[in-house]
Amino acid sequence: MTLPDMEAYQKAVQLKKSFTDPVLSRGELERTPLMTPVVASGGFALTYLFTVDGQKVAVRCFHKQGNHLEERYHQISRFVSLHPELSFLIPVDYLPHGIEVNGARYPIVKMPWADGYQLDHWVEDHLREPDALTAVGREVAKAATQLRAAGAAHGDFQHGNILIDDDNAIRLIDYDGMYLPELRRYGASERGHRNYQHPSRQNSYNADLDKFAAATIELSLEALAHAPSLWSRFHTDDHLLFTSRDFAEPDTSNLFSALSAMRPVADAAARLRRACLAPLPEITLALSGGQATEDHGRASQAAPDELVCIEAHDRKKLFQHIGDKVTVFGQIKSIKQTDLPRGHITHLNTGDFRKGAFVFIAYDEARSTLEERFGSNLGGLDGSWISVTGLLATYQSRWHLTPEIEIVRGSAVRTVSGEELIALRASSRGENPPAPSTPPPKRVRAFPPIDIQAGLKELYSDSPAVRQAKPAPARPAAGPRSSATASPPPSAPPPRYPPPASRPQANPWVPPPAPVRPPIPPPANPWIPPGAPARPSWGTRLRRWFEGR
C-alpha cells in the first residue's frame, strides 16, 4: 500500500469530513499564524493536534511504511491498558481506516495529547537547576527499568520521544519501535536514534533495548547538573551530549575524557565506556560495574547520519524529502517580519520568495529568542550562513509552493563558518566531510647553537683570579739529565695580551667612564651688537630704582 505524502495529509486534515471517527470529525485543527496545520514529525508518522470538546487529541498519520502496524498497535494498546502503573505511557487507539485521502482510506493512531517540553528543550531551560536535572535523569532510568520488568521496551529512548511536564514528570511518545513478547515474531521495525544506541544494536529486538539509551541520558543529565558548561561544549542539534561517534570510539572521545575528569560522574562514565566496547549480550554486566569483555579489535565505525543534509538552493532534493526531519543550510539574503492577527511571523529568506526560494520561518516564541541572540531586527543574521534541523514542509503562496522549515527555538539556528560550510556541502553530496585544516607551522629562523660554558671559560681564562686559582704545572723530579733524553724547553708563545703590569686591574663587566665634556656656553643674543656693554637685569634695575627713591 502506497501511503500519502505530507502535502496530501496537510490538505486532508483540514477537512473534517476526511475522518471516519465521529470524535475527530467534530474536532478543531490547531493552526499556525499562516493558517497551516501545526505538525510534528517522528518515526513513521506526522502528528497533528486537534481540540475536541475541550480536550486535546493527537492524531498520527503514517507517511512511511511500517512493519505490521495494525497488529503492533493492537498489542501495544492492549499492553498500555493492562499496565496503568506505567503512568508515563499514553493510551493509544489504532484506527485502520481512520482518514480518507484522495478517495482512499488509511490508518491513523489517536491518543490523548501529552503537554510537556521535549527533553532537549527542557534541559536547555533548566541548566541551572541541578536537582531537577538529576531527578529527571533518574525518572528516565526508572521508566526503562519498569518497562523491562513488565517484559517490554520502548525501543527508541531519545530526546524527541521524552516529554517533561511542569511537575518534571516524564511521558513517553512514539511507540512505533516498541518491543512486546507478542511482537517478537515480527522483529524490529527500527533501530532507534543513532546518538542513543549501542554501536552493535543493529536489528536486536528484546526487553533490554532501553538499557543503554537510558544510561546515556541519565549520565548526561547528571553531568550537566555538575557542569552546565558541557551543554555549550558538546550539544548541537540532534542529541544531548553523546553522539554515535563517542560510542564507536570511546577511547578517543573528548566527551568521555571530560567526564572521566569529573569525580561525581567518573565511575558512571567508566561503566558506560566499558559498555560501548562490550559485546551486546554483556551491556547489562558492563553498566552494573562487572568485568565485561572489551573488544578493542572490533571495527570502530560510527552509525551513519540518518538526517539528510540539503543546501537551500537544491530545490529538487528539498521536494524529495518533504515530511522528513532534515538539516537545511543556506545564506540569508533578506529578512521579513510580519504582524498578523494570529501572531508574529519572521521569514529568513535564502532568495526571492516570490520564486519559491527556501525560507526559514519563525513564530512568536522563536522570534523572541532569535532577537535576544541577533538583535531586534535580526541584523546579525543578514548575509550569514545558517543551518537548521527540523521538519521539512511546504507553504502554498500566491506565486509558488515554497519549501520551509519552522524554527521552533532560537537556539536551533546555528551560524556556519567556512570549514563547517565545506563539511555541510560535502555531506549534502553524500561525501565524507574533509578533515579540519590545521594552520601551517610557523617558520623559525635557525641560529647556530651557542655554547655558553665555552664562552664563559674563554672570557675568564685570562683574569687574575683564574690565573691564581690555576694549579701550577707538575715539574719533573730533580736528577741528572741525559743529553739523549733531555729536550730543550719549548719556546713560549707570544703573549696574547699585554703583561698584567701594563694594564689596569679593571672589572671587565663595568663599562669605562664616559669622557668629561666642557660645558657648552649659552648662545649669544643676536639682538645685542658685538662689544656692547652688558645690560643689567630687570631685578638689578628695579633694586636701583628703589634705592634711588
Image: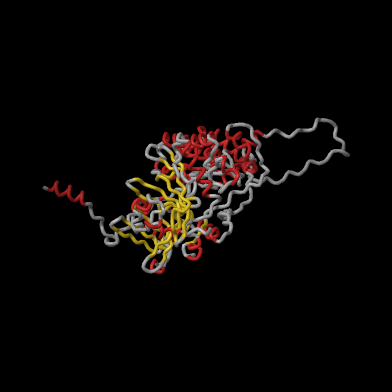
Q: Which of these two is toward me, 487 or 213?
A: 213
Residue extending furthest toward the right: 484
* Residue 140 position in % (x across, y down): 48, 37
* Residue 67 position in % (x across, y down): 56, 50
Q: Which of these two is toward me, 168 or 428?
A: 168
The answer to whether one can see residue 371 in this image is: no
- At x 50% / y 39%, what residue is drawn? 79
* Residue 206 position in % (x across, y down): 58, 40
Q: Is residue 3 above or below residue 121?
A: below
Q: Which of these two is toward me, 515 or 24?
A: 24
Residue extending furthest toward the top: 478
Residue extending furthest toward the left: 549
> Residue 531 is drawn in which quadrant?
bottom left
Q: Is residue 382 above or below residue 130?
A: below
- Colour pattern: secondary structure
Number of callouts in the render? Answer: 0
The answer to whether one can see residue 238 in this image is: yes
- At x 55% / y 61%, what residue is drawn? 429
* Residue 104 position in % (x across, y down): 47, 60
Q: In this view, does 20 lie to the left or right of 479?
A: left
Q: Which of these two is toward me, 346 or 258?
A: 346
